[in-house]
Amino acid sequence: QVQLVESGGGLVQPGGSLRLACAASGMIFSINSMGWYRQAPGKERELVATITSGGRINYADPVKGRFTISRDNAKNTVYLQMNSLKPEDTAVYYCNGFIRYSVLVPVNEYWGKGTPVTISS
């Protein structure tokens, strides 16, 4: 029904930048909030940033001032611009979305499969 597909992960040196993208596809009636989470090896999945359909944004403290979340509602896509990357940003980054695929059903939560980000020299 609904799929979230991430792209843009990879290996970058400390201080570098990456831009992640997540496209929602399938039967979509409306999208509420979308966001990014990450999970480092041996750690719990944690919030990175979220953005509502109205543009309200929330960032986790470790990424404030370095990461920027944005969305293109016409393309059902959310982006994460990551600058000044640090080794501790290394993780698998997951896209998350609260999406309604029909006016007849409630909003459901969806997850992408994740894209790995490695920060290393």
Image (cartoon, grey):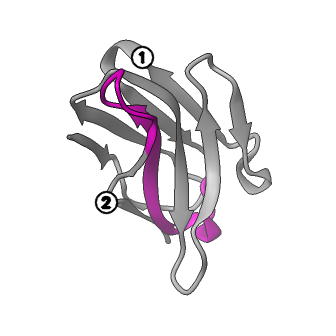
Q: Give the spatial CA distance, label 2 vs label 1.
A: 21 Å
Q: Which badge, 2 or 1, is on the more N-terminal residue?
A: 1
Image point (42%, 19%), residue name:
72
Query: For the residue marked with disc 1, what is the amino acid?
Result: Asn
**Residue 98 visible, this angle:** yes
The residue indicated by pointer 1 is: 73
Q: Secondary structure at mark 1?
A: helix
Work out which residue is located at the far bottom of the displayed protein and give it: 42
Where residue 65 sits: x, y (%)?
A: 75, 40
In reply to whether residue 87 is colored magenta, the answer given is yes
Image point (36%, 21%), residue name:
103
Q: Quadrant of residue 45?
A: bottom right
- Give the magenta-colored segment's residue range: 84-108
The residue indicated by pointer 2 is: 113
Q: Secondary structure at mark 2?
A: loop
Relative horizontal placement of residue 30, taking residue 2 as reference (left or right): right
Looking at the picture, tell me which residue is in the foreground, 92 or 13.
92
For residue 31, above or below residue 8 = above
Within-10-Å neighbours for mark 1: few <14, some 14–19, many 20+: few
Query: For the residue marked with disc 2, what is the amino acid?
Result: Lys
**Residues marked 2 and 1 touching at CB (< 8 Å):** no
Within-10-Å neighbours for mark 2: few <14, some 14–19, many 20+: some
Where residue 35 sits: x, y (%)?
A: 53, 42
